[in-house]
Amino acid sequence: MRHDVELHVNGLTTRHPVESRQLLVHYLRDTLGLTGTHVGCDSSNCGACTVLLDGVAVKSCTVFTAAVDGSEVLTVEGLASDGEMSPVQEGFRQCHGLQCGYCTPGMVVSATGLLLDSPQPSRAEIREGLEGNLCRCTGYQMIVESVTWAAENGGPGPAARAHADRAEQAGQR
């Protein structure tokens, strides 16, 4: 069965017919071409597909596109503002929070969601907040340092704040 779905992705309205069982990760990648959202495991274990959905970090491989009709979605591509990386993206650059980079989009989006909810998290809270994201390359120390840097240098960033504000105004957050 097909459904006409309207989503607000990275601040832009999108409208497409989708199959009932199409996952949000595939809508973002295949329909919209937003390939920063990675498919890592197809079983919701790795977190590489994490996006902000109505201001909350979710694994987009666990969400049916048709079920979130009318929602606000923010992907890693939408975090930059006016050509400038978000503080979280910059934190990963400054503190070398990535190696191969495959998990990085999911980590960055999860960290952004964490900073929306907890602007000054402790290192333990950062580790707990990133629990659902796996990195096969690092020991997570540089990732925690990256999120700490971001918390001290602007938090989630203007695009994420605007996304959360839109979701809140729509009564979705």
Image (cartoon, rainbow, N blue to C red):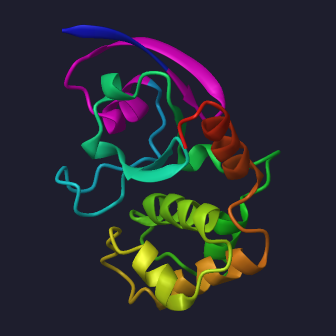
Task: Please identify the residue farthest to the front as the structure is shown.
Answer: 171
Task: Please identify the residue farthest to the right as the structure is shown.
Answer: 82
Tell me if 155 is positioned left or right of 46 in this view: right
Q: Is residue 29 magenta?
A: yes
Q: Is residue 141 magenta?
A: no
53, 135: nearer the viewer: 53
Q: Position of residue 111 (x, y in %)?
A: 54, 67
Question: In the picture shown, does residue 32 fall above or below 93?
Answer: above
Q: Residue at x 79, y 54 (%)?
A: 84
The image quarter containing residue 145 is bottom right
Q: Quadrant of the C terminus?
A: top right
Q: Residue at x 55, y 50 (%)?
A: 76
Q: Quadrant of the N terminus?
A: top left
- Start-end of magenta stretch: 7-31
Tell me if 106 is positioned left or right of 25 in this view: right
Q: Position of residue 28 (x, y in %)?
A: 42, 33
Q: Position of residue 147 (x, y in %)?
A: 60, 77
Q: Residue at x 39, y 62 (%)?
A: 102
Total marks in image = 0
Tell me if 131 is positioned left or right of 87 in this view: left
Q: Residue at x 34, y 60 (%)?
A: 47
Question: In the picture shown, does residue 140 fall above or below 52?
Answer: below
Question: In the picture shown, does residue 101 fall above or below 163?
Answer: below
Q: Position of residue 153 (x, y in %)?
A: 79, 75
